[in-house]
């Protein structure tokens, strides 16, 4: 079975072809064959939005219109899929519409089933994708098909440029939203702090790079809502604290590299501490067997290493995506489409809609 995944919710225009093998068990009790990410094409608009220090929705949507067909052509190589999976939300509505309307048209002319995918659900399961071999080994396939139950219930932390959500995962498609940011998303705070420091866009990778050379304890920054009784987050106060710090210290003149490194290290430390502390509280409260993370910010090595050391103390499993699959991509959309394929239908081309605020808990 070949699944075409399409993603256009923000500033990445992506198409991927995922081929799923035969799920039947072989004589040795192993699946006879697995799956393969045949193609994983991503056209990033990063450069286009860099001069604005963030994504401009209208500019993004126009570029999606121009690039979606070439991206699909590159991914499909004239092949015809058996299923189309497309992001239907959450995201920028005009950007979402480009992928969704293209998917509807293709499903109609090819007469193939179509399924709408929640972008955050796709980030959640992206740890199952494997970039090293491109083909999951039998053990990993068993994890997916037969042992997924063993990691449940799980708590998932989805951290991206648009979202910071804590989700209780009871199964594929069975989710409860237990906490979220009340203002800025974690990735958005990285982006805005980088903009204040005039370091460029996207801010996450740049800040974590400079943070390596900095002292995280030299500049004290707040840890908003770290002790609140709920599982919500707030990153706007942390970002504003950096703003005031910069206004106080540098009314004139330029910042030294050592100071920039310390600000980056201090900010990253504060963001990671809040994310880890709140997530571990949720893991304990919901008696989760494992923690899953996904989304652009899950590329942050400080976040990964802090979770690793804390979770090993608790004896819990920790699942996070290969760096290649942390950001927006269409392989994860195809995979989420596969996991939910019961909802796919040949009739979906008629009325599938894009939802800017699509909720993961249905
Ligand atoms: O998931 P994603 O590619 O797009 C959205 O769905 O938003 O996430 C992009 C976000 C950006 O805010 C970017 O700065 C952040 O992920 N990011 C990072 C790192 N790499 C990307 N944040 C912190 N540390 C990183 N290494
Ligand atoms: Zn994303």
Image (tube, rainbow, N blue to C red):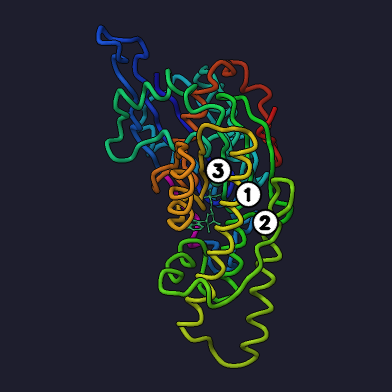
- Residue 259, image x, y percentages: 50, 82
User: Which residue is drawn at the image coordinates 66% and 26% (left, top)?
Assistant: 352
Q: Secondary structure at mark 2?
A: loop
Q: Secondary structure at mark 3?
A: loop
Q: CA distance from mark 2 to mark 1?
A: 7 Å
Q: Tell me which numbered mark, 1 or 3, is placed earlier along the sequence.
A: 3
Q: Residue furthest left?
A: 28
Q: Residue furthest top?
A: 27
Q: Which residue is mark 3?
A: 8
- Residue 151, image x, y percentages: 48, 28
User: Which residue is drawn at the image coordinates 68% and 36% (left, top)?
Assistant: 177
Dots 2 and 1: beta carbons under 8 Å? yes
Label number found at residue 117 = none
Q: Tell me which numbered mark, 2 or 1, is placed earlier along the sequence.
A: 2
Q: Which residue is mark 1?
A: 278
Q: Is residue 263 magenta?
A: no
Q: Residues within 10 Å of mark 2 (few under 14, many from 20)?
A: some
**Above/below status of 76 relative to 141:** below
- Position of 189 with respect to 27 (left or right) is right
Q: Quadrant of residue 1?
A: top left
Range drawn in magenta: 42-47
Dots 3 and 2: beta carbons under 8 Å? no
Q: CA distance from mark 1 to mark 3?
A: 30 Å
Q: Tell me which numbered mark, 3 or 2, is placed earlier along the sequence.
A: 3
Q: Nearer the viewer, mark 3 or mark 2?
A: 2
User: Which residue is drawn at the image coordinates 46% and 29% (left, top)?
Assistant: 335
Q: Residue furthest bottom?
A: 252
Q: Which residue is mark 2?
A: 226
**Above/below status of 254 relative to 42:** below
Q: CA distance from mark 3 to mark 2?
A: 33 Å
């Amino acid at each position: 079975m070949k699944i075409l995944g399409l993603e256009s919710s923000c500033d990445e225009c992506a198409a991927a072809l995922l081929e799923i093998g035969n799920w039947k068990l072989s004589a040795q009790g192993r699946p006879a064959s697995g799956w393969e990410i045949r193609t994983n094409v991503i056209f990033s608009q990063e450069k286009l939005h860099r001069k604005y220090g963030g994504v401009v929705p209208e500019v993004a949507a126009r570029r999606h219109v121009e690039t979606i067909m070439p991206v699909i052509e590159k991914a499909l190589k004239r092949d015809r899929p058996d299923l189309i999976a497309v992001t239907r939300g959450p995201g920028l509505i005009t950007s979402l519409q480009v992928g969704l309307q293209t998917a509807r048209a293709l499903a109609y002319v090819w007469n193939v089933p179509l399924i709408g995918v929640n972008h955050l659900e796709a980030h959640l399961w992206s740890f199952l994708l494997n970039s090293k071999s491109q083909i999951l080994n039998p053990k990993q396939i068993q994890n997916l098909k037969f042992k997924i139950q063993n990691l449940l219930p799980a708590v998932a932390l989805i951290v991206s440029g648009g979202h910071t959500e804590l989700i209780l995962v009871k199964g594929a498609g069975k989710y409860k939203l237990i906490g979220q940011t009340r203002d800025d998303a974690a990735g958005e705070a990285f982006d805005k702090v980088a903009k204040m420091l005039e370091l460029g866009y996207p801010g996450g990778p740049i800040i974590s790079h400079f943070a390596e050379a900095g002292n995280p304890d030299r500049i004290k920054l707040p840890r908003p809502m770290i002790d609140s009784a709920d599982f919500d987050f707030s990153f706007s106060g942390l970002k504003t604290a950096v703003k005031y710090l910069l206004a106080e210290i540098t009314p004139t003149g330029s910042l030294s590299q050592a100071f920039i490194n310390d600000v980056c290290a201090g900010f990253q430390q504060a963001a990671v501490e809040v994310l880890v502390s709140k997530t571990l509280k949720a893991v304990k409260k919901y008696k989760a067997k494992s923690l899953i993370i996904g989304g652009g910010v899950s590329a942050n090595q400080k976040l990964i290493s802090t979770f690793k050391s804390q979770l090993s103390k608790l004896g819990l499993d920790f699942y996070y995506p290969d760096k290649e699959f942390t950001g927006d991509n269409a392989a994860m959309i195809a995979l989420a489409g596969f996991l939910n394929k019961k909802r796919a239908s040949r009739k979906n081309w008629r009325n599938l809609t894009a939802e800017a605020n699509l909720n993961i808990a249905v």
